[in-house]
Image (spheres, grey):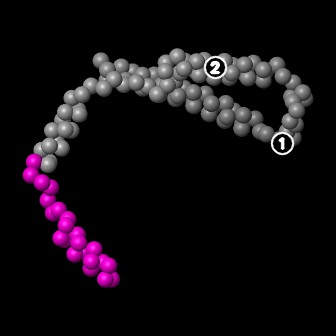
Amino acid sequence: MQEDKKLGSLLTTYAMQEPSTGFEEMVMQRIAAAKKIQLPITPLISRLLQRTLITTFIAAAVALIIIAFFIEPNTLILKLDIPVQTSIFEQLFSFFIVFWIVMFVNFFWGKRFTIAIKG
């Protein structure tokens, strides 16, 4: 209780009630000057690395799909005896297709948006 009173008296004694004259104008001038500066937009990942990662991912996905068609279920090391309905596989397949369609639309939409900003 006593500490609150001391803190209150210190705040009223030393705290500033209003900013100094010209402070708001100075801040607004700095904000306006910062808006005028054109900084180059650089991505976090270089284009070469981005393309390499995308190409590697697509190659790995295609390789896994091709291997999945040719591998026999009996040759797998991990044996799963869980009965799975066909509808679950259809839902997973639909999910992956929709996910990648939305991903590519988002990717190209974002690229078009950045071109519009630059141009």
Q: Residue at x 23, y 72 (%)?
A: 10
Quadrant of the rendering where the N terminus is positioned: bottom left
Between disc 2 and disc 1, the foreground one is 2
Does residue 117 appear left or right of residue 81 in this picture? left
> In x, y percent, where is residue 74?
90, 29
x then y, percent, for residue 56: 63, 20
**Disc 1 residue type?**
Ile
Disc 2 marks a residue whose amino acid type is: Thr
Segment tinted magenta in the rendering? 1-22
Farthest residue, direction bottom: 2
Query: Can you give x and y, in whole percent of width and height, for residue 33 in the image?
Result: 19, 33
Q: Secondary structure at mark 1?
A: loop
| Residue behind mark 1 | 82
118 is within the stretch colored magenta:
no
In which quarter of the view is residue 116 placed?
top left
Tell me if residue 47 can be seen: yes
Res 9 → quadrant:
bottom left
Packing grade of label 2 (10 A; few <14, some 14-19, many >=20) is: few
* Quadrant for the C terminus in the image: top left
Q: Secondary structure at mark 2?
A: helix
Q: Are marks 2 and 1 in contact (CB under 8 Å)?
A: no
